[in-house]
Image (cartoon, rainbow, N blue to C red):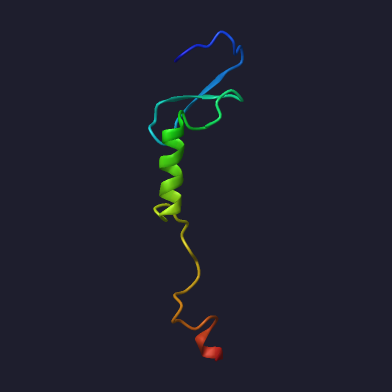
Amino acid sequence: MPQDSTLPLAKWVVCPSCKGQSLYANSNAFRPFCSERCKNIDFGAWASASFSLPADAPPDDMVFGDARLQ
């Protein structure tokens, strides 16, 4: 792990993008990422909908609720 003597309580975490070491401190403007490049890669994945959360909603062409009650 890299050491920075100017940051006595520096915490090192794994960069979510490249899996390298990333300084998690106020001095790292890109935290939790290690660099601007890794931050932009992650942002691009979200912007292109590569990341998504599973939806519990039925497809648009399905009736909502219990079909027996309609």
Q: Residue placed at 38% from the left, 32% from the top? A: 18
* Up/down of 42 relative to 4, above or below: below
Q: Where 3 sits versus 15, above or below?
A: above
- The location of residue 41, given as percent across then percent down, is 40, 41
Can residue 16 be seen here? The reply is: no
Relative to 39, is 28 on the left or the right? right
Outermost residue to the bottom: 70
The reply to whether residue 27 is visible in this rendering is: yes
Residue drawn where x is 46% and y is 14% of the image: 2
- Is residue 21 placed above or below 42 in the rendered structure? above
The picture places residue 7, in percent across and down from the top left corner, at 59, 13
Single out the residue that lies furthest toward the top: 5
- Number of numbered discs present? 0
At x 61%, y 25%, the residue is 26
- Residue 62 appears left or right of 31: left
Q: Residue at x 50, y 66 (%)?
A: 56
Note whether 8 is above or below 51 in the view shown. Answer: above
Q: Position of residue 55 (x, y in %)?
A: 48, 64
Which of these two is toward me, 62 or 42? 42
Within the image, what quadrant is residue 52 found in?
bottom left
Image position, residue 22 (x, y; %): 47, 25
Q: Quadrant of the C terminus?
A: bottom right
Which corner quadrant holds the N terminus? top left
